[in-house]
Amino acid sequence: MIANLVVGGLAAGCLYAMVGIAIVIVLNITDIANFAQGEMAMLTTFFAYWLMDGVGLPWWQAVSIAIVFGLVQGIIIQQVVIRPLIGGPVLSAIIATLGLNVVLNSVAGLIWGHQTYTFPSPFAFSPPFLIGGVPVSVDSVVNIAVGLVIIIGMTLFLRFTWTGLGLRAASQNQTVARLMGVSITRTSAIAWGLGGLVGGIAGILAAPSLFLDTNLMSALLIKAFAGGVLGGLNSLIGVFLGCLALGVAENLTGAYLSPSFADAITFIIIIAVLIMRPEGIFGRVRVRKA
Amino acid sequence: MSAAADIIRVSKPRTSGNWGPVLGGLFLLLACAAPFGLNGYGLYLLTLTGIFALVALGLNLLTGYAGQISLCHASLFGVGAYATAILTQKAGLPYLISLLIGALLTTAIGALAAIPALRLKNIYLAIATLGFGVVLQKIIFEWRSLTGGGGGLALAAPIIGGYEVGATGLYYLTLAFMILGLLGAWNVSRGRTGRALLVIRESEIAAGSLGIHAPRYKVTVFAISAFYAAIAGGLFAYLVRYINPESFSVGLSISFLSMVVIGGLGTIGGSIVGAVFYVIVPELLRGIKDAPGLAFGLLLVIVMVFMPQGLWGMLRRLWRRS
Amino acid sequence: MPSLAIENVSVDFGGIHALKDVTFALEAGSIVGLIGPNGAGKSTLLNCISGITRPTRGLVRLDETMLSSMSAASVARHGIGRVFQHPELVADLSVRENLMIACHGSLHYGLLSEFLRLPNVQRQERTAAEKVTEVLARLGISDSADTNVRSLPYGHRKLIDLGRTLLMDISFLLLDEPIAGLNDSEVARLRDVLLDLRKELGLGILCVEHNMPFVSRLCDRLVVLDLGQLIANGPPAEVLGDARVMSSYLGEAVDA
């Protein structure tokens, strides 16, 4: 039924959107497409798992601590790996994040092995909501709710706080921002920290349904990039809506056109949209004077 | 007195021309002698290096010189592999002819990948080409009657001139193609096309003002890189003798891109060095208990942090100091 | 004598009328200055002639050839050279290599020949290299020929940018603020080069500039744009005395 598919698509889309938001904050402020974003989130999720399974903490506590871990992880990676790369060729930084991707994946594999774990969710046994007569799983509602909270929270943060203002200034023009007293290294660290934090939330929400293993986030990462590009990578709202659109499109093509071609068809749609609107649906054109 | 007087002089040390050909000759000799000193696995690795070097040569012209990011080259590699295999196996064409026809077919497909490149750049182009690659891979997977679908294709040894080509034969064939490809890419990089690509990377508007039609060159360089990937694919198919769509995934495209960046973007030598790094280094790390992947990933990060221009630049600097 | 005609050119960007019905002509061998307050549409006009922007109405003609329907690369190949306000050279290459790029139009060989580096290709490359050496000498920058462009000062890079057009077999040259950022000796050299070009090659030169003394000494004629419209077209003395021209500049100063 179409309502179910749309809601499911929105829920999946919100997961992509969270990763997408993490990517876009880092991309806009440090000009680096972080291909390790997924693995960072995966590591944060494993950490949460360990807190619950190994240490015995309840879900809320474990998740809260893990989210902080995600934040710290982002900052550490920015300081150790990314800072030396600033000013160099962008592709080199991207390949470095790919290397990081492999490193984090291996580290997780070393610690937890490559088997699949079940990640608990406090909503697993809750009965589905009934919205307009359509049963909607609690997981979906939570994903969408958290997604909305994150996008609204981020937008408010960027618009109404001093730190947020600094981040926006740095994303537009680093030299001018520096002249106005914004510390670029500090904003970079904050950007990466936020990325790690939001990505971690995405991982924790994705794990119950996708099952926790070292490959949890790899498919999600590509979808996040694809949805972000579709919506327009220089706008948070654009990334959010693009990822939602991607989630819904996937579900609908999967159900009505062909389940095995859903991915291919969705990509064809994205390519077609991009050829018509190269900066993404909601993207802003960066004007370059001749 | 010209204005040049007040300019800071930065001299560019030229490598003394005499050593280049000598070194090249030495490597050629070693390369030709290799099969006599190596076991089967070593020869396999060397052949694979040559194959990846071919991909890297083409991809470096596209990404290094022209600045176009592509994440579909594993699929083009795959199309070349499948086209060669199908033409040889099912149509009964001689191997070398299949290789060539397969490459021409793939070139046409690769030129299609240029269409997004006419409008898109950077991460947007990366995702568009990634999507293109996914679609190609999907077509290979679904066209079961032709490609064997997910089950893949098992291949018999190729035959050239009535003789069955074994591991050594394939090695020499790969070496020959690699040397041809290397010289060709080098010539293109020194000619008007190579220079046009560099301007296009820098600024398409500047290119236009010099009479260089960027769209035409983008299609050309996508086509060239597809040709290289396809020949490499056709050789690869008969190196491993069994191909399936899984092998030609986004992950491999990303590896190809990494190869070129690690080796050195915009350099011919970097393509070879990158291929060597990608094939040989994981082998060397195999011994590291439990964590060959970790070590390789760390190496990637370290190389990029300390040598962002790639290994080739570092090697040249070391050579000049000595 | 070839002539470049701009006929009733109008350009609208969304709601903005960047150019309104501009008409004038540029003859071979003449140097015309294009002046006007900021935002008057001077760069837009140059972009229209170069083929970077398509006019919403009107056309640009080189004798009988319609330039306004062509791509920028085609316009360049028809002999219209363009020097931009900020030189866009390939940073990692040397001066010589940057100039070689401009020889593109004079090299006629196919991809396969290039791939195999046939003798024909080698010969043409050598000829092009010789021409580059000549241009380096003419501009007086032979000493830094093999220097990486990245390390050269601004004025130097502007000269190289100009040098590129010399390798292109042009009949008309469009310059966008050529002396901005140059010191006095560099300005004098540029002026000499431009006058030489006019004398030796019979180039028609259209020069956008803000520096009045430079422009009135160099140019045969001045064309004045204000808010997209052509408000004067004549010899420098006459134009600079024109009341409308004065008020378009003064009016702007008073508002600022």
Image: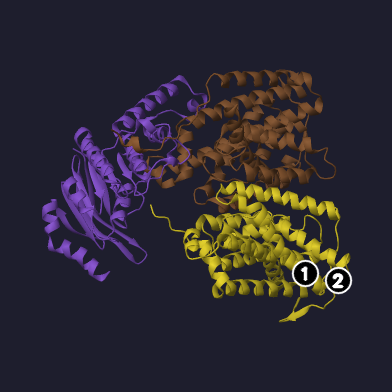
Chain colours: A yellow, B brown, C purple
Is residue B135 depicted above or below B157 in this figure? below
C99 sits left or right of A239 in the view: left
Is residue C207 depicted above or below C135 in this figure? below
- Say which mark, if any, is on residue C93: none
Residue pictured at 56% horizontal, 74% vertical: A161
* Camera-nearest residue between C132 and B17: B17
Letter of the chain that mark 2 sits on in the rendering: A
Establish whether labels 1 and 2 are both on one chain: yes
Is residue B85 depicted above or below C18 in this figure? above
Sort mark 2 into few (<14), some (14-19) or many (20+) by Cα contacts within 10 Å. some
Report the amino acid beneath label 2: Leu
Disc 2 secondary structure class: loop
Letter of the chain that mark 1 sits on in the rendering: A
**Mark 1 or 2, nearer chain start:** 2
Residue pictured at 57% horizontal, 49% vertical: A90
Find disc 2 in the rendering and name its residue.
A57
Q: Cβ–Cβ below 8 Å for labels 1 and 2?
A: yes
Note whether residue A252 is visible: no
Q: Quadrant of residue C94?
A: top left
Disc 1 secondary structure class: helix
Note whether residue B319 is visible: yes
Sort mark 1 into few (<14), some (14-19) or many (20+) by Cα contacts within 10 Å. some
Residue pictured at 62% horizontal, 64% vertical: A190
| Alpha carbons under labels 1 and 2: distance apart | 10 Å
- Residue B252 in the image, given as x and y percentages of width and height: 69, 43
A50 sits left or right of B263 in the view: right
- Residue C84 in the image, given as x and y percentages of width and height: 34, 47
Report the amino acid beneath label 1: Ile
Find disc 1 in the rendering and name its residue.
A65
- Residue B302 in the image, given as x and y percentages of width and height: 68, 44
* Camera-nearest residue between A251 and C211: C211
